[in-house]
Image (cartoon, rainbow, N blue to C red):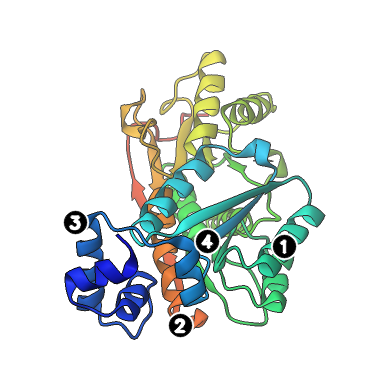
């Protein structure tokens, strides 16, 4: 059925139905819920071209990934949550992959000029991110998964990366560990910079020296976690504990510890940050892994929700959230071994 026929079936005007399905804020929530329920029940789907002409909206959110070949499990989980939320409102996701920063800038400019998306999601922001200034200049609405410095307020959702690593480092120090290693991401990114700060400040607060040889950076993969842990264990004074930035790198670190003939939780304690993958549960590993935890799929869902609020007229400064991180102690951490 077309819009006119559907509107007549539910006793509303075509204009009200169109605005309700497009998320206009002036439509009462109960009216919008009634329209969406009826559309689902009757199998009505609006004509996308007609809806775009009527509302001036594209009905899509864009996201640009730099380095498409590195689209890994973290990105997949985030996109799963984002799509779950946007599908409920009939919003599509337009994904672009580029290889360089210049290509990324060009991609944003094309999206703004073509009007193929109503807003974009900026992921893995740098401490000072040129994309934020560019999107302000282009007038393209956006929300950031993470934080960055900028002169103009912007919408964002982040987790407390500083607090997560502060908690993990404190726990290990309380267990008597003095040589604590960190497997981190690239500190040009805000999340990794905040984790590095949480690590260094906690060491200083506990009177423990910072040793750059105990810090490794790179992609959160099993292979990188394995190589970095091997390098830590080869030091003349190896660590008795390690904090891994993800469960993927934690798997590699655990493998390196076992190959070295050591026992996780006894000879070397391990804490990992868990983004909550459905196929990798820290409590089912041997030993069960102590984690800082924040589900990345839930973050994707919430960012989708916030993006819709942004398009409905909410001010960016009212859409700024920092989620606390849960700390779960399991069998992979224990007292520091005797010297």
Q: Estimate the spatial distance between the alpha carbons at disc 4 and disc 3, rounded to whole Å.
A: 26 Å
Which of the two discs, 1 and 3, labels the residue nearer the N terminus? 3
Q: Which residue is mark 4?
A: 61
Kindly identify which residue carries mark 1: 110
* Point 34% across, 30% down: residue: 288
The reply to whether the C-beta atoms of the residues labelled 2 and 1 are less than 8 Å apart is no
Q: Secondary structure at mark 3?
A: helix
Q: What is the quadrant of the N terminus in the image?
A: bottom left
Looking at the image, residue 35 sits to the left or right of residue 259; the answer is left
Q: What numbered label is drawn on residue 313?
A: 2
Res 235 visible: yes
Disc sitting over residue 41 in the figure: 3
- Crowdedness near tag 2: few (<14), some (14–19) or many (≥20) residues, C-alpha within 10 Å: few
What residue is drawn where x is 37% and y is 73%? 23
From what the image shows, is residue 221 above or below residue 230? Answer: below
Closer to the camera in the image, 92 or 119: 92
């Amino acid at each position: 059925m077309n819009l006119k026929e559907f509107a007549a079936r539910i006793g509303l005007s075509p204009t009200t139905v169109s605005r309700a399905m497009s998320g206009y804020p002036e439509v009462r929530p109960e009216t919008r819920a009634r329209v969406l329920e009826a559309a689902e029940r009757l199998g009505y789907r609006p004509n996308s071209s007609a809806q775009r002409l009527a509302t001036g909206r594209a009905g899509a959110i864009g996201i640009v990934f730099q380095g498409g070949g590195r689209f890994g499990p973290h990105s997949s989980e985030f996109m799963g949550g984002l799509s779950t939320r946007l599908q409920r409102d009939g919003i599509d996701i337009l994904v672009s992959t580029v290889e360089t920063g210049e290509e990324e800038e060009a991609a944003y400019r094309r999206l703004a000029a073509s009007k193929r998306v109503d807003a974009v999601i900026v992921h893995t922001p740098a401490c000072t991110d040129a994309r934020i200034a560019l999107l302000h200049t282009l007038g393209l609405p956006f929300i950031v998964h993470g934080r960055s410095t900028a002169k103009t307020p912007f919408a964002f959702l982040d987790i407390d990366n500083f607090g997560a690593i502060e908690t993990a480092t404190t726990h290990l120090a309380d267990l008597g560990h003095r040589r604590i290693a960190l497997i981190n991401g690239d500190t040009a990114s805000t999340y990794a910079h905040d984790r590095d700060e949480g690590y260094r400040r906690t060491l200083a607060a506990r009177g423990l020296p910072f040793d750059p040889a105990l810090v490794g950076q790179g992609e959160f993969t099993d292979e990188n976690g394995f190589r970095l842990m091997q390098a830590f264990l080869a030091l003349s004074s190896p660590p008795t504990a390690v904090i891994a930035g993800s469960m993927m790198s934690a798997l590699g670190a655990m493998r390196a510890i076992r190959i070295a003939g050591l026992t996780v939780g006894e000879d070397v304690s391990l804490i990992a940050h868990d983004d909550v993958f459905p196929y990798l549960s820290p409590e089912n590993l041997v030993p069960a892994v102590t984690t800082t935890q924040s589900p990345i799929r839930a973050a994707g869902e919430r960012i989708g929700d916030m993006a819709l609020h942004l398009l409905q007229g909410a001010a960016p400064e009212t859409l700024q959230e920092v989620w606390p991180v849960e700390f779960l102690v399991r069998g992979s951490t224990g007292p520091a071994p005797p010297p």
